[in-house]
Amino acid sequence: QANMDFYTFVNKLKKNKKEYFKKFKDNKIYKSYNEKEIIIIGSLIEKEGLDYIDKRKISSVILNRLRKNMKLQIDASVLFAITNGTYNLNRKLYLKDLKVDHPYNTYLYKGLPPKPISYVGKKTLDIIFEDYKTEYLFYFFDYSLNMHIFSKNYDEHKTKLNDYRNKK
């Protein structure tokens, strides 16, 4: 009987997912990416973004980079790779971590990781389908401001990153 409850629950989840995605069948994002890819994108946003506004900007960066066939270079995917999904690193990422040969390392491999790196909430999926437009291609986390800093090109990104590092 307990298993029956579990299967009922799983079937309800599957039905809800199907109904959710059906609403977006004419959406440009849904025509560009399949459900699995959208969920993977969502998982990256979940792990990187702090709040609604931040997640919108990060979503735009990810979609901009995918459209330009750039490596995503998402720290959360590297953390997932080197901790086997536990995220218990207890230190900052090192440059050597970004070179670890793992299919989830978006610094090494172009495109999306093979599977999601976390649970994805409906609000994050809504953000993806919104297809918020920016010209941003880069960002980093400024710990002194407790926020992500976004840039439109690599030169701007390097300048902002060097300014941040010099403040420390």
Image: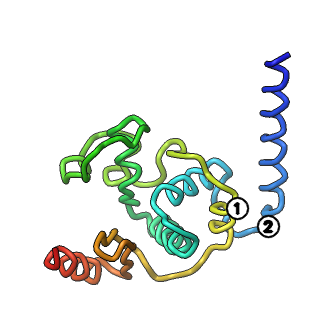
Q: Nearer the viewer, residue 69 or 126?
A: 126
Q: Residue at 39% x, 73% y: name it.
A: 147
- How far apart marks 2 and 1 lie (CA) works out to 7 Å
Question: Residue 26 — which label?
Answer: 2
Q: Quadrant of residue 52?
A: bottom right
Q: Determine whether label 2 and label 1 are within 8 Å by CB.
A: yes
8 left or right of 107?
Answer: right
Question: Residue 16 — which label?
Answer: none
Q: Residues within 10 Å of mark 1 (few under 14, many from 20)?
A: some
Q: Quadrant of residue 125?
A: bottom right
Point out the residue furthest to the left here. Answer: 166
Identified by mark 2, the residue type is Asp
Query: Which part of the image, by quadrant, shows the C terminus?
Result: bottom left
As helix, strand or loop, the secondary structure at mark 1 comes to helix
Q: Quadrant of residue 88?
A: top left
Q: Residue at 46% x, 82% y: name it.
A: 135
Query: Which part of the image, by quadrant, shows the N terminus?
Result: top right
Q: Residues within 10 Å of mark 2 (few under 14, many from 20)?
A: few
Q: Residue at 47% x, 71% y: name it.
A: 61
- Image vertical order of residue 162 relative to residue 34, above or below: below
Q: Nearer the viewer, residue 133 or 68?
A: 133
- Image vertical order of residue 24 relative to residue 111, above or below: below
Q: Nearer the viewer, residue 130 or 69?
A: 130
